[in-house]
Amino acid sequence: MSTAARRDLLLALVPAADIVDIEVRSLVSLHSVVSQANARGVLVMGSFHDFNKTPTLSRLRDIILRAEDQGASAVKIAAHTETPADVARLLDLFSLNRLPLAVMGMGPLGMASRVVLGSCGSVFNYGWLHEPNVSGQWAAKDLAGILRQCSVQDRD
């Protein structure tokens, strides 16, 4: 879909939306959508996906800062996780603590990362209803149950 067609479609849908998800790389070209969403109090989720690797921490922080500068009110980062160091890098993003973050792994450590990241501050996550969209996703029902069990609560 062309940028103009995406823009027109999103502009038509913003009045009915609570959240609009726009790739960080498209925030500038879809600035009119970002502006309208912000004016209406619709959350703008700047999203970034890397299906091959977990980028460096400095690259991930740059993405978050760029999204913030371009009007996003939250950032979603999904990256391929193969090693504990990849998951640790995603966890380290919460130390930036500027915008709400939705952070999740895909791939071999995707399932584990989604539980850890969801328990440590990720504001939302994706679970599948009928079948996974990417490697490392949980069934939504199972993920919700596990996150409830892992939640930090006062357990008297």
Image: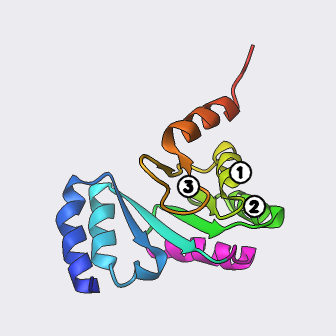
Q: Mark 3: which secondary structure?
A: loop
| Front-lying residue, 144 or 11 | 144
Q: Quadrant of the N terminus?
A: bottom left
Horizontal relation, residue 7 to residue 47: left or right: left
Q: Which of the two labelled residues, at mark 1 and mark 2, occupies the earlier sequence position?
A: 2
Percent across and percent down for residue 131 are 46, 53
> Disc 1, disc 2: CB below 8 Å?
yes
Q: Which residue is mark 1?
A: 112
Q: Amino acid at mark 2?
A: Val
Magenta segment includes 123: no
Q: Which of the two labelled residues, at mark 3 and mark 1, occupies the earlier sequence position?
A: 3
Q: Which residue is mark 2?
A: 87
Horizontal relation, residue 100 to residue 70: left or right: right
Q: Quadrant of the C terminus?
A: top right
Magenta segment includes 64: yes
Q: Which of the two labelled residues, at mark 2 and mark 3, occupies the earlier sequence position?
A: 2
Q: Residues within 10 Å of mark 3 (few under 14, many from 20)?
A: some
| Front-lying residue, 149 or 16 | 149
Cα separation, mark 3 vs mark 1, equals: 21 Å
Q: Residues within 10 Å of mark 1 (few under 14, many from 20)?
A: many
Q: Mark 2: which secondary structure?
A: helix
Percent across and percent down for residue 80 are 65, 69
Query: Range of the magenta residues?
Result: 53-70
- Is residue 68 visible in this depiction of the protein? no
Residue found farthest to the top: 156
- Is residue 73 visible in this depiction of the protein? yes
Q: Which mark is residue 100?
A: 3
Residue at (48, 61) in percent of width and height? 133
Q: Amino acid at mark 1?
A: Ala
Percent across and percent down for residue 42 are 33, 56
Cα separation, mark 1 vs mark 2, equals: 9 Å
